[in-house]
Amino acid sequence: MPTIFAPEQASGRCPAIHAFDACAHEFDDRFGAWRSVAAQRRAVRRHLLRTFPAGSRLLELGGGTGDDALFLAERGRNVVLTDGSPAMVARAAEKVRAAGWRHRIETRELALEQLGEVGRRWNGTPFDGAYSNFAALNCVPDLALAARGLAPLLRPGASVLLVVFGRWAVGEILIQLALGNHRVAFRRFARGDVPARLGGHKFTVRYPSLGDFRRAFVPYFRLVRTRGIGVFVPPSAAEPTISSYPRLLAGLETLDRLASVPLAFFGDHILLHFIRTSAPVESDEHRNE
């Protein structure tokens, strides 16, 4: 696979990137053993395989340490993994080399906010699709900017699967209330920046509504379906306790498969399936006229 992005360092890295940089060395050990995370990841991967056939050339946004890219490469997909965190990208590159998939996976340091810079100079073959798992888009303050940057990189008709935080996550609310974290229990209803912490490092996230995402991606993308991820499977706030009950989790995972459509909005995450329209992307100069 040819190199399409020149390596570049993100200037003025945001606090979220600092937080993920700091925990990159322990990220897999910390989250990889959690059965609830694995169950939600399996649900996402089923949709990735159904949506993107073997041979597809895909762009991953916020790819972290590369688990999903490796999964897809092993099944015949080609992936360019991007992430704003240098340490996460370095970890992903190590895993790709160790697994022997460098011919199918590229790793590039690229924040979602930088997609527009790539789009303005992109003149290669568009990607067949793009995806982002586990709420990378919730760290982006300007969704419309990200959508406008992504659009030129995809062919018309290409699918984009975005897994974002659900705002009405009943499991999160119940668990946080049980833990006595009343303020945290309802944080997803807040508008604007919400404080978050990872490995002792503070940053902020946002919880846009479905309407916010739909409006931000128009006219370059059209939302065609939604799926709940973690409707019954609990969020990571239930860890590590819930991992001690694998049979219970297996039952909840079965319920999730049945409820992912009718109860999508109550999921810990929601999978948004967009289709790239044929709308051309206007230059910034033309948009400001």
Image (cartoon, helix red, strand yellow):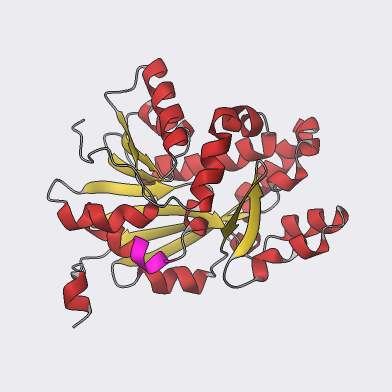
* Residue 232 shown left or right of residue 100 in the figure: right
**Percent of width and height locating residue 22:** 56, 37
Q: Is residue 267 visible?
A: no
* Residue 252 shown left or right of residue 157 in the figure: right
* Residue 43 shown left or right of residue 255 in the figure: left
Instruction: Name which residue lies at 36% across and 61% down.
Output: 146
Q: Farthest bottom residue?
A: 289
Quarter-wise, where is residue 224 in the image?
Answer: bottom left
Residue 143 magenta-highlighted: yes
Q: Main secondary structure of the magenta part?
A: helix
Instruction: Name which residue lies at 21% across and 67% down.
Output: 281
Instruction: Name which residue lies at 67% across and 42% down.
Output: 253
* Residue 232 shown left or right of residue 58 in the figure: right
Q: Is residue 86 visible?
A: yes
**Percent of width and height locating residue 107:** 34, 34
**Percent of width and height locating residue 202:** 63, 51
Q: Farthest left residue?
A: 123
The quadrant in which the C terminus is found is: bottom left
Q: Which residues are magenta?
A: 142-146
Residue 89 versus residue 231 in the image, above or below:
above
